[in-house]
């Protein structure tokens, strides 16, 4: 689906969202120190054409992502959009 750079201070990671051969959606973070993490996600098309991506098992903060029409990755919570990562 895409690769983005999260260049916020103290985070600095490369984000990759992709489908596996088994058609499972994954969200992978790779940090500058070499550590990484992968979570299984689900996607939901939105009426405006954007794609909402959320943790398959949910999360404690109500956070989710939106891939917008410019292929940017928006970070959302119940308080609104709090960060947007550009595609690389």
Image (cartoon, rainbow, N blue to C red):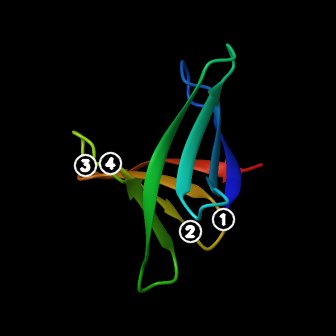
Label 3 to label 1: alpha-carbon separation? 22 Å
Image quarter of the N terminus = bottom right
Q: Which of 36 and 7 is in front in this view?
A: 36
Side (left or right) of 49 relative to 16: left
Q: Which residue lies furthest to the front in this view?
A: 22
Is disc 1 in contact with disc 2, using a CB cutoff of under 8 Å? Answer: yes
Q: Which of 27 and 10 is in front in this view?
A: 27
User: Which residue was labeled with disc 3?
Assistant: 62
Is disc 4 in contact with disc 3, using a CB cutoff of under 8 Å? Answer: yes
Label 4 to label 1: alpha-carbon separation? 19 Å
Is disc 3 in contact with disc 2, using a CB cutoff of under 8 Å? Answer: no
Front of the two marks 3 and 1: 3
Q: Where is residue 54 in the image (x, y as percent from the top left)?
A: 39, 56
Picture residue at 46% right of the left edge, 48% below the top: 40
Side (left or right) of 66 relative to 56: right
Q: In which quarter of the image is residue 43?
A: bottom left
User: Which residue was labeled with disc 2?
Assistant: 68
Label 4 to label 3: alpha-carbon separation? 4 Å
Task: Tell me if residue 48 comes above or below residue 43 in the rendering.
Answer: below
Q: In which quarter of the image is residue 20?
A: bottom right
Q: Which of 35 and 32 is in front in this view?
A: 35
């Amino acid at each position: 689906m895409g690769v983005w750079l999260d260049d916020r201070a103290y985070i600095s990671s490369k984000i990759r969202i992709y489908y596996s051969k088994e058609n499972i959606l994954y969200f992978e973070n790779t940090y500058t120190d070499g550590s990484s993490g992968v979570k299984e996600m689900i996607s939901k098309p939105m009426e405006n054409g954007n794609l909402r991506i959320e943790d398959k098992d949910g999360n404690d903060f109500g956070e989710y992502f939106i891939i917008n029409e410019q292929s940017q990755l928006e970070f959302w919570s119940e308080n609104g959009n709090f960060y947007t990562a550009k595609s690389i």
